[in-house]
Image (spheres, grey):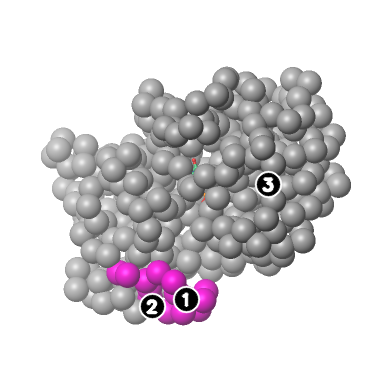
Amino acid sequence: INITLVAGARPNFMKIAPIVHAIQKAKKEGKPLDFRLVHTGQHYDKKMSGDFFEQLNIPEPHANLGGGGGTQAEQTAAIMVAFEREVMENRPTLVIVVGDVTSTLACSIAAKKLGIDVAHVEGGIRSGDLSMPEEINRMVTDSITDHFFTTSEIANSNLRKAGVPEARIHFVGNTMIDTLMAQLPKFKKPEGEIFEALTPGNYFVMTMHRPANVDQEHSLKAMIDAILEGTGGLPIIFPVHPRTAKNLQNIGITAENLLMTDPLGYLEFNYLVKNSKGVITDSGGVTEEASVMNVPCVTLRDNTERAETIHLGTNELVGTDPGKLKPYLDKIMKGEWKQYQGIPLWDGKTSERIVSKIVEAYL
Ligand code: UDP
């Protein structure tokens, strides 16, 4: 069974690392499995890509497609062309794509058109919001996926409603949480002066990179002002995504307690999340990690494709209106927040289940 595993952007690396390790383990145990790791090059700088390979012990990719930069269509096209060539040369049994980034969409289309089976890890989740490129990536990918490896009952039910036969839906859990659990003992405080004075439970972590929040300078400024107002002067660590950096510079916000930094490594970022008073974010993955670590989390979006983080986790959906934020932050400040109740199969063993299912299906 020859598997081609695709990764392209930051949130992919945490999702593929444990799958790579599970394949390596199965291979060692004598299962007839092998893999090629293909990096599409969607994220290429060290802080958004290279560092994660080191920290998460992901082997050097067998191929790098260099498909970064450009508009959505330019990037999709460049990755499709390069991945088509990659797949024609190597003819895998199965292509595995993860998550909802441009590479997920581009590689699944290129593979399927060459008659190769496609497995989608994190298939079936939906926000219903077609203004987000990620939702389009999910819908298109799932329309041609053969094996859906799902994170939640909600995803299963979305797929059933879309007419996907039961035999193709594999409810396995969340590989991003495999990585979280495996790496937890290695979390470390980031080096640097701004982090030195932080004490557990006395600071916030925030991330923002969705176009709805960061592309308009006035709304970005209004949201940061609301965050500063609601967090009582506590330090706010803000690792700035490349997408956000330029507009942030233009609005020129300075506040003594707003501690902006480059994107952090995985072990450092999650060290900070784990020990924080709360997380303010528009990320999807961060809401999952905060939930499992039982850290209060507010999401600056009008919808989420990860509703289980709200029903069973520590996440609340605030929306993109800065005026709505204060009551949520007040609750976090007072220590009145819901506790993590456990999300089924988010137990650190998802990647093993995925590999077993693949062996079952193809052997
Ligand atoms: N992350 C990180 N360093 C940072 C910010 C985030 O390692 O400075 C990790 C985070 O722990 C999670 C992933 O990046 O595993 C989330 O990626 P992102 O927010 O870019 O994507 P999304 O989940 O919104 O698609």
Q: Nearer the viewer, residue 161 or 58?
A: 58
Residue, disc 1? 70
Highlighted magenta segment, given as a residue range: 65-80
Mark 1–mark 2 contact, CB under 8 Å?
yes
Residue 133 coordinates in the image, percent (x, y): 59, 66
Residue at horizontal 34%, vertical 59%?
Answer: 6
Residue 188, above or below 30: above
Classed neighbour count for the residue bearing mark 1: other residues with Cα under 10 Å, few (<14), some (14–19), many (≥20): few
**Residue 281 drawn in magenta:** no
Whether residue 119 is visible here, answered yes or no, is: no
Q: Amino acid at mark 2?
A: Ala
Residue for point 62% across, 50% down: 208
Badge 1 marks a residue whose secondary structure is: loop
User: How far apart are the alpha carbons under marks 3 and 2?
Assistant: 39 Å
Q: Secondary structure at mark 2?
A: helix
Q: CA distance from mark 3 to mark 1?
A: 31 Å
Q: Is mark 2 within 8 Å of ligand 1?
A: no
Question: Could you say which quadrant of the image residue 94 lies in?
Answer: bottom left
> Is disc 1's CB within 8 Å of ligand 1?
no
Marking on residue 31: none
Mark identifier at residue 78: 2
Q: Amino acid at mark 3?
A: Thr
Looking at marks 3 and 2 on the same chain, the residue that comes earlier in the sequence is marked by 2
Above or below residue 33? Residue 341 is above
Please name which of the two marks, 3 or 1, marks the residue nearer to the observer: 3
**Left or right position of 180 against 290:** left
Residue pointed to by mark 3:
254
> Mark 1 or 2 closer to N-term?
1
Query: Which comes before the other along the chain, label 3 or label 1?
Result: 1
- Residue 109 in which image quadrant: bottom left
